[in-house]
């Protein structure tokens, strides 16, 4: 499936300067302030993730929702020649895919990429593994002044205990832990949003346990 390209906004890009604290005036996500970051949803990695099929299904729903709402989507791949590329369902929605060797994706250019979208101060993260690449990347983003939101149902580790410890540590450091439905409803904000019906069907399929159409290679 080939997705249509979106119109690009005109105007010069600005360098990121100063504090990004404006988004902290609200405890809700805002679609206009969000950027979705996928960390290492790769073909050879996710089968080893605890409850991996559900993690990937929720990530797929998140990707489609962000695309429908015109939210920028950036993804990373850890040494893809060894761990494989991003799953097709995730990759096809991404505007940028960054290959990396550091566990902390910020060391391989994520902040530089996000910096081109100065208004996107809320970084919503879905990824694997929670206690390694997600944790280290999120800490760097927090130190850089971004607001970090971890979608727990779309983020996994090889073991539940490592995942739980990662979330506990991230919460203590200032990240916000959210569910898939929290993210979607906060991005929508209103029941008369033009994309409400499409996202409502996604939410219903999530609640019923019906998996999205995921391409696994």
Image: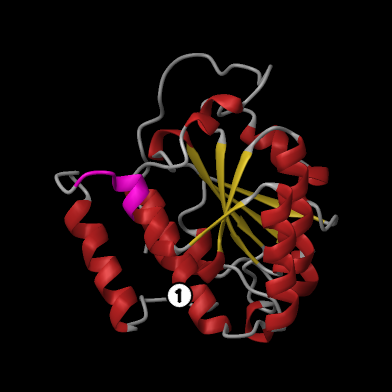
Q: Is residue 126 visible?
A: yes
Locate residue 84: give its quadrant: bottom right
Viewer-proximal residue among 45 and 140: 140
Residue 117 falls left or right of residue 198: right
Viewer-proximal residue among 5 and 54: 54
Residue 47 falls left or right of residue 95: right
Q: Which residue range is magenta in the image?
A: 185-190
Q: Looking at the image, what colour scheme do you see? A: secondary structure
Instruction: Give the overall secondary structure of the magenta segment.
Output: helix
Residue for badge 1: 57
Percent coordinates x, y for residue 123 in the rendering? 57, 44
Percent coordinates x, y for residue 92 in the rendering? 47, 58
Residue 143 falls left or right of residue 195: right
The residue depicted at 34 percent of the width and 83 percent of the height is 209
Q: Is residue 42 above or below residue 52?
A: above
The residue depicted at 18 percent of the width and 44 percent of the height is 194
Disc 1 is placed on an element classified as helix
Q: Which quadrant of the figure contains the C terminus?
A: bottom right
């Amino acid at each position: 499936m080939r997705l249509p390209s979106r119109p690009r906004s005109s105007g010069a890009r600005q360098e990121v300067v100063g504090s990004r604290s404006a988004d902290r005036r609200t405890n809700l996500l805002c679609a206009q302030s969000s950027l979705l970051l996928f960390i290492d949803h790769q073909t050879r990695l996710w089968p080893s993730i605890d409850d991996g099929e559900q993690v990937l299904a929720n990530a797929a729903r998140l990707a489609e929702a962000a695309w429908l709402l015109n939210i920028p989507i950036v993804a990373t791949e850890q040494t893809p020649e060894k761990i494989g590329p991003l799953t097709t369902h995730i990759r096809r929605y991404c505007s940028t895919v960054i290959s990396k060797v550091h566990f902390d994706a910020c060391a391989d250019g994520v902040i530089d990429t996000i910096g081109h979208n100065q208004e996107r101060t809320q970084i919503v993260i879905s990824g694997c593994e929670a206690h390694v690449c997600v944790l280290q990347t999120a800490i760097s983003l927090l130190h850089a002044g971004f607001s970090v939101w971890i979608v727990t149902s779309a983020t996994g580790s090889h073991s539940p205990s490592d995942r739980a410890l990662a979330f506990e540590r991230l919460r203590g450091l200032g990240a916000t832990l959210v569910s898939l439905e929290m993210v979607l409803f906060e991005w929508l904000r209103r029941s008369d949003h033009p994309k409400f019906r499409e996202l409502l069907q996604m939410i219903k399929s999530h609640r019923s346990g019906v998996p999205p159409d995921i391409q696994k290679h």
